[in-house]
Image: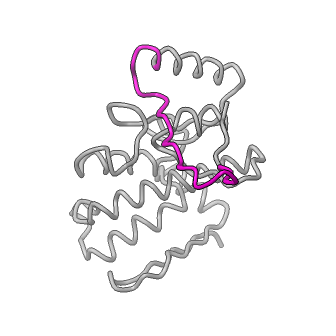
Amino acid sequence: MEGFYVGVHGNIEDLSEPKIFFMLKAEKFVKEVLHIKPQHSGLKLEAFVVTGLNENTIITCQRPLNKLISDCCTIIQEELESIALEKNIKKAVKMNYVNYERNIVEHCSVALIGWPLLGPVCNPSKVGRRAEVQKLLDALQREPHHRESCHWVVLTDEELVQQMMENWACHSHGEAVYVARKKRKVTGPGHKSNCHHQH
């Protein structure tokens, strides 16, 4: 027997998380034939069930915009944590949209490639209208080998050096690549800041 199980909540009041289980061949089918990451299939079924739409309707168009944004942020963060584990980064890595190039790309040697929208990587809540958010979500849900996929990759030493050179070049031309951190107020002579400089 080969197959998969996906269970989602039946209405908007139920806040239980989607439950999924895939046999090996069924998982391969979903990835290679349907071009969907198995863990994201729950999001699509949830959208269909909760909105009560039929097969001839665009499933995600009626979902609340904030839910689409939340799904984008969740996928980006979860995939970042996953690739950080692959690199044996012990400390928890939290996505930083404001200082993405310095705190994520340069510090962790990983990059989010295939960004489907104009402009640099930014918080999904800042990308624009529903159509832009939906386009980003679609790209994030595709398998990495898909030509329109948006996903994390580990950078080689050469790629990292090249990216750092490009970042400094852009920054020196006035682009806001490196955003200065807000200075913390010192409360007293014995106060020590928790900030540490990243190189």
Query: Looking at the image, is 79 positioned above or below residue 6?
Result: above
Residue at 39% of width from left, 72% of height from top?
Answer: 46
Residue at 24% of width from left, 48% of height from top?
Answer: 131
Query: Looking at the image, is 132 positioned above or below residue 171?
Result: below
Q: List x then y, in percent, for residue 147.
A: 46, 34
Q: List x then y, in percent, for residue 55.
A: 26, 66
What are the residue bounds of the magenta stretch?
Answer: 171-193
Query: What quarter of the picture does the N terminus occupy?
Result: bottom right
Q: Residue furthest front?
A: 189
Side of 96 relative to 50 (left or right): right
Tell me if residue 5 is in the magenta stretch. Answer: no
Look at the magenta stretch and give its main secondary structure. Answer: loop
Query: Looking at the image, is 114 positioned above or below residue 77?
Result: above
Report the front residue among 35 and 71. 71
Q: List x then y, in percent, for residue 8.
A: 45, 78
Side of 100 relative to 64 (left or right): right
How many numbered circles are shown? 0
Report the front residue among 37 and 107. 107
Q: Quadrant of residue 176?
A: top left
Report the front residue among 169 and 11. 169
The colour scheme used to paint the residues is one colour
Residue at 59% of width from left, 39% of height from top?
Answer: 104
Q: Quadrant of residue 25?
A: bottom right
Query: What quarter of the picture does the C terminus occupy?
Result: top right
Tell me if residue 186 is in the magenta stretch. Answer: yes
Q: List x then y, in percent, for residue 132.
A: 28, 45
